Amino acid sequence: MSQGSVLGPLQFISYTDDVTSAFVKHEVNISIADDKDVDIARRRLHGCVSSVSSWCASRRLQLNEEKTELAWFGKRSCLNKLDAVDCTLTIDTDSI
């Protein structure tokens, strides 16, 4: 349940159920084959986070960018290639 929510678990789920459409819309469930795809992934994630932020605002919820994190997962050899690539997202003035 959301921090500070006055809704019970079932009400919270029914209230937030459609947020997953932002992930589908921006195709964030992707596999990154090599470091060339990082920019594509970053653009999709940026669009998704922006959509989620708008979704939150339309429901009078606040997305705290300072508490939002981005994690990259993969084989060590693939992750080592990411050192040479900018993997951050910038939302408003915050870098994730």
Image: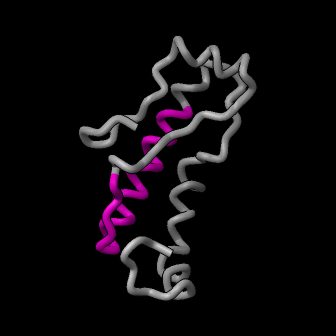
Q: Which x, y percent locates residue 95?
A: 34, 35
Q: Residue at x 36, y 66 (%)?
A: 56
Q: Position of residue 22 (x, y in %)?
A: 51, 58
Q: Farthest residue in the left direction?
A: 93
Which residues lie in the magenta part? 41-64
Figure check: 26 above or below 43: below
- Say left or right for 77 vs 44: right
Indicate whether 17 appears above or below 57. Answer: below
Q: Nearer the viewer, residue 1 or 84?
A: 1
Is 59 magenta? The answer is yes
Q: Out of 89 and 5, give the one closest to the viewer.
A: 5
Q: Check the image and name the residue furthest to the top.
A: 84
Q: Going by the image, does 25 lie left or right of 95? A: right
**In the picture provided, is 29 more to the left or to the right than 48?**
right
Q: Residue at x 24, y 38 (%)?
A: 93
Relative vertical location of residue 66 with respect to residue 89 in this rendering, above or below: below
Question: In which quadrant of the rendered view does residue 55 lie?
Answer: bottom left
Q: Is residue 38 left or right of residue 30?
A: left
- Tag count: 0
Say which quarter of the image contains residue 78. top right
